Amino acid sequence: MAKLGNRGLRVLRTIHLVAAGLWIGGAVALNLMIAGLSTAESDGQLYGFNLACKFLDDAVLIPGAMGCLVTGILISSLTNWGFWKHRWVIVKYVLTIFCILFGTFYLGPTVNDQPEISYREGLMALSNPEYIDNYYSSLKGGAVQILLLLLMFLISVFKPLKGRGRGFVPEHGPKAS
């Protein structure tokens, strides 16, 4: 397969970084919004708050996550980084897939169900056990997601698991004679 030149790689990495920023920033913003939920004063305020959370998930988090996955695959397939050459790349793929699946099947429903509950019940939703459970699940799961996203970010910056086979391979170690 053809490899990207320097300019193409820079463009692809830029898109990857923008997607990562959307994913991490969206996750932090959503968790802060949920954590900062103060008691709404009207049915409409609560419903609007829940719609805003769902919108942030759908319009920022999901595109950021998918953008990271797609650009990561492209970077691996169109450069010498490859998919299996470096353990840090493998770890990032595993974490990316886990975070996407965790977000889709655990966190997504906790955010997606809230607008319907608050629309149907208004302020009474604040005492609904399902609404409360979704709230706390979003907070706890969101914190886990943010920690994993930050771990992936740190792995990208420091690349602690360079190479494969003989443990850690320093990036700038002494050259073999």
Image (tube, rainbow, N blue to C red):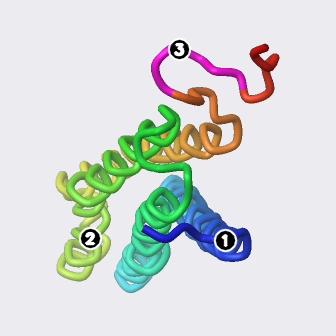
At a point 62% along the width and 28% down the height, the residue shown is 160
Q: Nearer the viewer, mark 1 or mark 2?
A: 1
* Residue at image mark 1: 5
The crowding category of the residue bearing disc 3, from other C-alpha atoms within 10 Å (few below 14, some 14 to 19, many at least 20), is few
What secondary structure is marked by label 3? loop
Query: In the picture, which quadrant includes the C terminus?
Result: top right
What secondary structure is marked by label 2? helix
Q: CA distance from mark 1 to mark 2?
A: 42 Å
- Magenta stretch: includes residue 79: no
Q: Disc 1 marks which amino acid?
A: Gly
Residue 155 location in percent, x, y?
60, 38
Residue 121 location in percent, x, y?
20, 75
Count all numbered tags in the image, as a single digit.
Answer: 3
Most foreground residue, 40 or 90 = 90
Which labelled disc corresponds to residue 167?
3
Q: Disc 3 marks which amino acid?
A: Gly
Mark closest to the chain's N terminus, 1 or 3: 1
- Left or right, 84 with reference to 4: left
At a point 48% along the width and 56% down the height, the residue shown is 76
Most foreground residue, 166 or 125 = 166
- Left or right, 36 with reference to 175: left
Assign the magenta stretch its main secondary structure.
loop
Most foreground residue, 64 or 59 = 64
* Residue at image mark 2: 112
The crowding category of the residue bearing disc 2, from other C-alpha atoms within 10 Å (few below 14, some 14 to 19, many at least 20), is some
Q: Which residues are magenta?
A: 164-170
Q: CA distance from mark 1 to mark 3?
A: 30 Å
At a point 38% along the width and 86% down the height, the residue shown is 44
- Quarter occupied by residue 8: bottom right
